[in-house]
Amino acid sequence: MSKASLLSIRPEELAERFQGIEPKEARRILSIVHRTGSVPPFAPPGVRRESFALVRDQLELRTLELVKRRPSALDPFVKYAFRTADDRLVEAVRILLEKPGRFVVCVSSQTGCGMGCAFCATARLGSGRNLAAWEIIDQVRQVRDDLPVPGRVHGVVFQGMGEPLANVDALIQSVGVMTDSSLQSIDCRAITVSTAGLLKPLPHLLASVPRVRLGISIGHADPEKRRALMPVESANPLRLVLDVAADHARESHIATMLSYTLLRDVNDSEQDADAFLSLLERYVNRAGMAPRVSLISYNPIGPLDPFLPCTSEQADRFRKRLGVMKIPVVQRYSGGADVGAACGQLGMECGKDRSPGQAL
């Protein structure tokens, strides 16, 4: 599944691959592919026939199959289920921003997830496989094609199925394509990579695409309690992950997004907030700037779910407790819960639609 596709190649890479193709021809061909989702039958204006023939005959365009589109009846969120060539389902979500006509696409980077976070539906699917760069990019392309007019994709969040840093090379390649002005033309600063916190690939990501915003799922600030919720803590201590994030923020002036999913009687007490405050103070001292803190309401993920959303009163007390550091804290609305599009719910569609014996 790692074979190159026209959707995952940048113009300069195409020109390098075929020495006879001029950069402007490469941009023209790939721009049409991204805009239309197809290869034109004939050489387009500005592209020589021999150049076009090289691309048409030696590279293919592969796309995901859209199998379900589910608009929420509660809010403007829309969830999409795509089928891969090897019969696996992945999900993406269209999110409307406050400014009219602007949308964010929440994309998946794997067909499952091996991180084992206790409060995430995708973890129930197991590790699955990495998505190729073109499979990530095509989620954005197809959602963009489904936008109302006028409308445009303003940003992308890697917060769907999978751990993005476990698929770091495809992640970096897909960001390069998304931000190319002749392809998806998305501002790199409007792309957020949300991770549970993998230390080894993190410097590679930040060196390759330093203008992306890094998002880190906290779970709990206490290492032992976090380990129970997020096993990644054992080999990737959150404090060390936040040190890398703080260094990146200091150099790039792009604040890290710290996401904290509130779980009733698990991580929503005053003591839990104080533990988080200690981490925030460490981050601020190292980064020289405040992070963006996002409190997320928990979305139940089905039968045998051991967690409950915390009450609105407790969420408000937690937020106010964090306010002593004068750091902006957002209590984030997590929409699309009725179609399994809310935070932590991606993967439910796959679990429901998968027949016994179907590959994860």
Image (cartoon, rainbow, N blue to C red):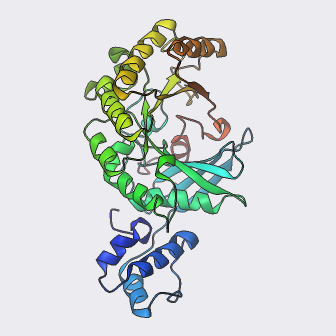
**Looking at the image, which residue is at 25% across and 28% down?**
235
**Looking at the image, which residue is at 53% across and 83% down?**
40
Residue 137 lies, with reference to residue 249, above or below; the image says below
Q: Name the image quarter holding residue 309.
A: top right
Can residue 351 be seen in the rendering of this structure? yes
Expressed as whole percent of the image width and height from the top left, the position of residue 174 reads 41, 57
Residue 23 lies, with reference to residue 308, above or below; the image says below
Q: Nearer the viewer, residue 311 or 52?
A: 52
Residue 241 lies, with reference to residue 137, above or below; the image says above
Residue 316 appears left or right of 200: right
Expressed as whole percent of the image width and height from the top left, the position of residue 331 reads 60, 25
| Quadrant that contains the N terminus | bottom left
Can residue 297 be seen in the rendering of this structure? no
Residue 288 lies, with reference to residue 254, above or below; the image says above
Expressed as whole percent of the image width and height from the top left, the position of residue 17 reads 30, 77
Q: Name the image quarter holding residue 147.
A: bottom right
**Looking at the image, which residue is at 47% across and 74% down?**
30
